[in-house]
Image (spheres, helix red, strand yellow):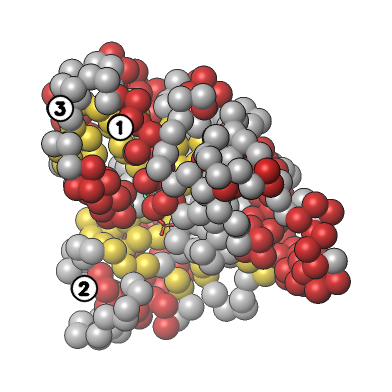
Amino acid sequence: MSNTSTIITRADCEKLDQQDPLAVLREEFDLPAGVIYLDGNSLGARPKAALQRAQEVITREWGTDLIKSWNTAGWFDMPSTLGNQLAPLIGAEANEVVVTDTTSINLFKAIAAALQLQSGDSKRKTIITERSNFPTDIYMAEGITRWLDRGYQIVLIDTPEELPTVINDSTALVMLTHVNYRTGYLHDMAAVTALAHQHGALILWDLAHSAGAVPVALNAAKADFAVGCTYKYLNGGPGAPAFIWVPAHHQAVFHHPLSGWWGHANPFAMSPGFTPTPGIRRALCGTQPITSLAMVACGLDTFGKTDMQAIRKKSLALTDLFINLVESRCASHPLELVTPRNHQQRGSQASFRHPHAYAVIQALIQRGIIGDYREPAIMRFGFTPLYTRFIDVWDAAEGLRDILDSKDYDANAERHAVT
Ligand SMILES: *Cc1c(COP(=O)(O)O)cnc(C)c1O
């Protein structure tokens, strides 16, 4: 697909689907007819298994077995069981990940723990992140530093190339999102981690657009902390709990202020003082949303039928194809690719800037081609190799071409609350 001068036909895409070793995994998902879903980076599609699992949780585990299910149905252990199932997808070991709370809350815990670890060195007062980071990451850092009121400063950089010049001996924490939610830019995790460590800084990676999308090697990169979502590429369901990773060597010194009873060494001792449990479960806070948490396993089960290398190979083929088709077929329109062409710097999405991006996305959605809009003027298309076919890519590019050629969009379309 790298030869842009080749004319690609829909029949070529059908052939690619026939040869695709991941094609069978589409059967694991219940996708509505007539929809091309390119928004699995925002809310993953529903695994078929989730319906039966939800029924089981609600009727048998909750309905019949009631409170016994905390023990008999594995409810109490579920954050750790799921964390262990997720660990291989992000290059983590068993007992280093729990699935719990939201990404925002897990960011709070990790930022707090990192700042406390660095508090012995009063020169370390900066948290470095990107202005283009997903806003909640910046908001959480703002909230905690303002509340601590110890002179911490958040340094916002505009390009990844600035990292070597801004990371220095006054850096407490580097907090980056591995794959940028808007552009799909993919950081070199090992290189940036090494850079942070050279200056004694800690590093926190947000894997919201990486987990299940690109291979991640947290331990190999020697990263310090990581968080991420399960409702995006991991297909855990709307609002499914997030995850937090603390490597074994940091666990004993990982202290965060949300010291709820689920992080206690012996929660049912009901003792009045807080003693954190020695392992990763100290990252938990309170009682977990079990019905929602149970769905996460259905999403993770699909990943057990393939591996991240195969997913990455198809992901790059899908994004290459989409970029080629859009650039060749929509060449007369003011589209600008904002996703890196270089494979080493690309996540599993392709984003284009267009002056009427919002209206064009709305027109695509009306035709059953679901991407999304992100400020400013960006059309974002996520490619989930588990259920996206090459013909879907062809049809989506063709739909976009037709909308742009015919100007079949309402340039004054009103914005919905969720774009
Ligand atoms: C999607 C996303 C989040 C979402 O956080 P929630 O607390 O789950 O709403 C956070 N950070 C990044 C980088 C994201 O892409």
| Position of residue 72 in the picture relative to residue 141 (left or right) | right
Determine the residue positioned at 25% across, 70% down. 357
Q: Position of residue 80 (x, y in %)?
A: 65, 42
Q: Does label 2 point to a residue whose CB lies under 8 Å from ligand 1?
A: no
| Residue, disc 3 | 166
Relative to residue 100, is residue 378 depicted above or below?
below
Residue labelled with disc 1: 115
Q: Which of marks 1 and 3 is nearer the N terminus?
A: 1
For the residue labelled by badge 3, is the local secondary structure a helix, a strand or a loop?
A: helix
Quadrant of the image for the C terminus?
bottom left
What kind of residue is marked 2? His
Alpha carbon distance from label 1 to label 3: 18 Å
**In front: 287, or 180?**
287
Checking the image for residue 88, the label placed there is none
Kindly give the residue lying farthest to the front in the view shown: 272
- Say what secondary structure mark 1 lies in: helix
Q: Is residue 402 depicted above or below 65 in this figure?
A: below
Q: In the rendered view, would you say 107 is above or below 115? A: below
Residue ranking furthest to the top: 198
Circle 1 or circle 3, nearest the eye: 1
Give the image quarter of residue 366: bottom left
Q: Is mark 2 on a helix, strand or loop?
A: loop
> Is 311 left or right of 398, judged from the image as shown?
right
Q: In this view, does 369 lie to the left or right of 308?
A: left
Q: Which is more toward the observer, 85 or 293?
A: 293
Disc 2 + disc 1, Cβ < 8 Å: no
Which of 247 and 44 lies nearest the eye of the viewer? 247
Residue 355 visible: yes
Q: Which of the two labelled residues, at mark 2 and mark 3, occupies the earlier sequence position?
A: 3
- Earlier in the chain: of badge 2 and badge 1, it is 1
Q: Which residue in the structure is indicated by mark 2?
A: 356
